[in-house]
Each structure stands twice: as C-alpha cells, then as structure tokens.
Amino acid sequence: MSSYAIVDDQSSRVQYYGQWSHSTVDANAAWDGTVSIAFEKGAGAVFEFHGTEVAVVGGILIEESTRPVSPASFTIDGGKPWTYTPPNSYNGTFDNYLYDSNTLPDGSHTLNVTLLDDGSPWIFDLILYNMTEPNATVAAASSAAASQVTLITTVIAAPTGTSNTSPSKSNVLIGPIVGGIVGGRGVVHLRRARVLLPLLD
C-alpha cells in the first residue's frame, strides 16, 4: 500500500515568493490550524518532493468587492503549465483539491504554483504527495519540519473548476482524505468550515 505525506502550508519545506499572508485559524477549519493567503499577480510557492504524485488542498475567499478569482499556473519540473481557476463553491473552505499532478515518474520533482493576475484570494492549507522514500524523507527533515509531515494511506479525487489544459485523470491516485495515519494523529478528516481571515493590507 502506498504511503502519502501531508505537509502543512507553513512547513519550511514550502518556499513562498511574492506577497503572502500566513495566518492562524480555528484548528477545526484547516490542517494544523494554519493557512497561507495570496491574491496578487506573481505570488507563488515551490515544493520539492520525492514520489510519484502531488496534490494541493485549499480554497478561495471571494471578497465583497466581487473581484474574480485569479487563475493560477501549476508546473512540475518546469514542464507544461496547467492553468486553473477554482469554482465559487470553494469560497471560504479549505478542503478542496486545487491541483493533482496525476502519476509522475518515480523520483525527485519540483512543484511550482504562480498566481497569474490580481484577484480574490487563494488559500493554501496543505500539500499531499505519494512518498516512495517515506523513511528517508522524514529522517532528513528537521524536528520542527518533521512534526508537519504526517504519513497516511488513502486515495484522492480530482479537482473541479475551470482549466485550459486539465491533466488526464486516467490514473488518479490521490483522493478524499480519509485514512489511518501512521504518525499518531488518528483518522484524517479535512473539515469544512467557513471562517473570516485576516487579509494583506
């Protein structure tokens, strides 16, 4: 059975660039009670991992000004970008799949996500990936970073919304996060809740 890792948005393994706000919220609303928020063109994040699939989980926050949500570009290893705009149904919730790479060649990979325009905020909660070297990955992390990596066994579903080049969904491995954790946190349930978030000035 495959091992999957949950990496919190505020783990040191996630490298952000551009303008972001890193916030604390109700632990019932987001994984580890944290989210990262961006709404300006050029804001992005980079995540390196060793495995065969990666997914990003989060949501959006549609402002009263009704600014549309910006599309974002997702790339793996500098390859062809996948452009995606989440649906309005993702508003104010953090348990939505924003990206799923589908099956990748086993090895080291780099995920890069970039907002393509200004708009209502994107909210990042966590990253999931299929670990093919789980013991080595966790052992290499610092004690602080390791506390933000949780191993699970599960399967995962595709994101919904608008995309221009949606990856083939013929061999999706990652899906609704409900599984036994190999790390002492019990059963994983991404909880759906609407909250108000502090935004960037």
Image (cartoon, rainbow, N blue to C red):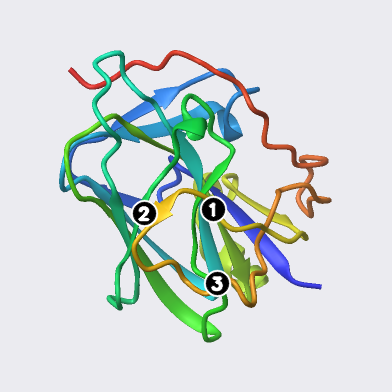
Horizontal and vertical percent for residue 186? 82, 40
Residue 85 shown left or right of residue 192 in the figure: left
- Pointer 1 with pointer 2, Cβ within 8 A: yes
**Could you say which is closer to the camera, residue 114 or residue 159?**
159
Disc 3 to disc 1, C-alpha distance = 11 Å
Disc 1 to disc 2, C-alpha distance = 10 Å
State the residue position of label 1. 159
State the residue position of label 2. 84
Q: Is residue 166 visible?
A: yes
Q: Element under label 2? A: strand
- Name the residue at 57% across, 30% down: 30
- Name the residue at 30% across, 69% down: 81
Horizontal and vertical percent for residue 197? 40, 17
Disc 3 to disc 2, C-alpha distance = 15 Å
Q: Amino acid at mark 1?
A: Pro
Locate the C terminus by quadrant: top left
**Could you say which is closer to the camera, residue 76 or residue 65?**
65
Q: Amino acid at mark 2?
A: Tyr
State the residue position of label 3. 102
The part of the image, by quadrant, that contains residue 60 is top left
Locate the N terminus by quadrant: bottom right
Q: Nearer the viewer, mark 3 or mark 1?
A: 1
Horizontal and vertical percent for residue 126? 52, 45
Residue 186 shown left or right of residue 165 in the figure: right
Q: Element under label 1? A: loop
Q: Against 6, is 37 above or below?
A: above
Give the crowd class for mark 3: few <14, some 14-19, many >=20 residues within 10 Å. Answer: some
Q: Amino acid at mark 3?
A: Asn
| Chain-order first, disc 1 or disc 2 | 2
